[in-house]
Amino acid sequence: MPSDGPILVTGAAGFIGSHLTAALLARGITVVGLDNFDPYYDRSIKQRNAREAGLGSVAPLIEADITDDAALRCVFDQYKPSGVIHLAGKAGVRPSISDPAGYMHTNVTGTARILAHAHRVASSRVVVASSSSVYGNCKVSPFSEDLDVSTPISPYAASKRACELLAHAHVHLTKQPVALLRFFTVFGPRQRPDLAISGFMQRISQGHPIAMFGDGTTARDYTYVDDIVQGILNAYDRAPAHGYRIWNLGNNKPVSLRDMIAAIEQVVGRAAQIDHKPMQPGDVELTCADISRSTRELAYQPRTSFHEGLARQWSWMRSLGN
Ligand SMILES: NC(=O)c1ccc[n+]([C@@H]2O[C@H](COP(=O)([O-])OP(=O)(O)OC[C@H]3O[C@@H](n4cnc5c(N)ncnc54)[C@H](O)[C@@H]3O)[C@@H](O)[C@H]2O)c1
């Protein structure tokens, strides 16, 4: 029997996880957060995210590693989550190139353990963060969920695709519903400091040069974090009706790197000094989500324009004194 316990959010102290936690709590839903404060970026940033989301005050935050089976056993036994939203993982594309084993361990082994424990305590469903990077350098745009995604070009992308495949086997064997959400470059307040918009805003505002990889024509389907959170909540609600299902959460409006820099210059009110560099291995040329399936099945509708989202991110950065 499914329990009526809290929703377990993994990666709750991270960028997306902290926004999701706040949104769940705002709806009066009981949450347990889990995060290991992975050193990929500064612990103090994650502590601030967690605090702002109400973790450690309104909801508990467990410091644990998703690859630690014994720790997960304790958490799942204690809280018996009614559902799991699994966002924890190693998130960067470029660092995965020098640490493929570490990415596979955290992302794939960690996901396998989360699925196993969710099944063991009869959680009603699991929602798992996947990524637009699974599409690799796909030649067909926009990217629909039915495209062949057997040619990832970074270990990060391969690890996310492996999670999707693992989830398929899990649903086949257990009948526990699992939703896979392919996020397209998420931005907004609390964006990870390694991501381009965050780094560029900081450097341009301080008069430091920024590295532009490639000729500026690569493009990303930037998606505002509140829209992603809405998509996650809708997927959580509808997952049991679908069993195993993949949904894109994107914006369907790619912005080129050159236009992204120009938009940041406008928002920040300062011209960028550009340091031209060659394309980075592992980086894809374009991401562009076909959101017709998520619109139809999840009532997903991104509402925040790129410019509006940038303005909100910049205003948040300024509130921190940047
Ligand atoms: N931000 C994006 O643009 C984007 C795009 C596609 C997919 N995603 C995926 O969405 C999820 C959330 O991304 P984010 O941008 O919020 O990243 P984030 O790094 O801010 O959040 C991930 C959180 O997971 C935690 N974590 C890492 N390893 C862990 C482990 N072994 N055990 C427990 N916790 C662990 C980290 O400490 C971090 O707080 C990730 O799975 C990421 O791959 C993000």
Image (spheres, rainbow, N blue to C red):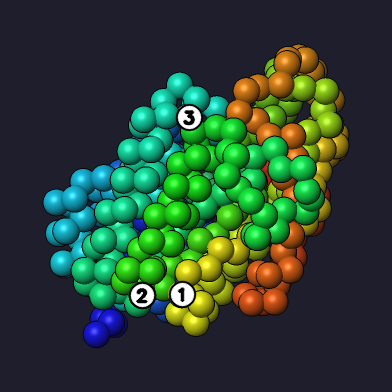
Q: Is residue 28 above or below residue 219?
A: below
Instruction: Determine which quarter of the picture holds residue 201.
Output: top right
Q: Which residue is mark 2?
A: 175
**Is residue 180 visible to the viewer in this orientation of the structure?**
yes
Name the residue: 77% across, 22% down.
214
Residue type, label 2: Lys
Asked whether disc 3 touches disc 2, contact meaning CB atoms under 8 Å apart, the reply is no
Give the distance between the C-alpha atoms of the residues marked 3 and 2, in whole angstroms.
Answer: 32 Å
Give the distance between the C-alpha atoms of the residues marked 3 and 1, in whole angstroms.
Answer: 30 Å
Give the distance between the C-alpha atoms of the residues marked 2 and 1, in whole angstroms.
Answer: 7 Å
Q: Earlier in the sequence, mark 3 or mark 2?
A: 3
Viewer-side residue, 205 vs 153 = 153
Q: Earlier in the sequence, mark 2 or mark 1?
A: 2
Name the residue: 68% across, 34% down.
284
Q: Earlier in the sequence, mark 3 or mark 1?
A: 3
Asked whether disc 3 touches disc 1, contact meaning CB atoms under 8 Å apart, the reply is no
Dot 1 lies on which element?
Answer: loop
Asked whether disc 2 touches disc 1, contact meaning CB atoms under 8 Å apart, the reply is yes
Q: Is mark 3 within 8 Å of ligand 1?
A: no
Q: Position of residue 191 (x, y in %)?
A: 57, 44
User: Which label sits in the foreground, 3 or 1?
Assistant: 1
- Asked whether, in this view, residue 304 is left or right of residue 180, the answer is right
Instruction: Determine which quarter of the picture holds residue 269.
Output: top right
Q: Which mark is residue 243?
A: 1
User: Which label sits in the foreground, 3 or 2?
Assistant: 2
- Asked whether, in this view, residue 56 is left or right of residue 296, the answer is left
Crowdedness near tag 3: few (<14), some (14–19) or many (≥20) residues, C-alpha within 10 Å: many
Q: Is residue 312 above or below residue 217?
A: below
Q: Which residue is mark 3?
A: 96
Q: Position of residue 252 (x, y in %)?
A: 77, 56
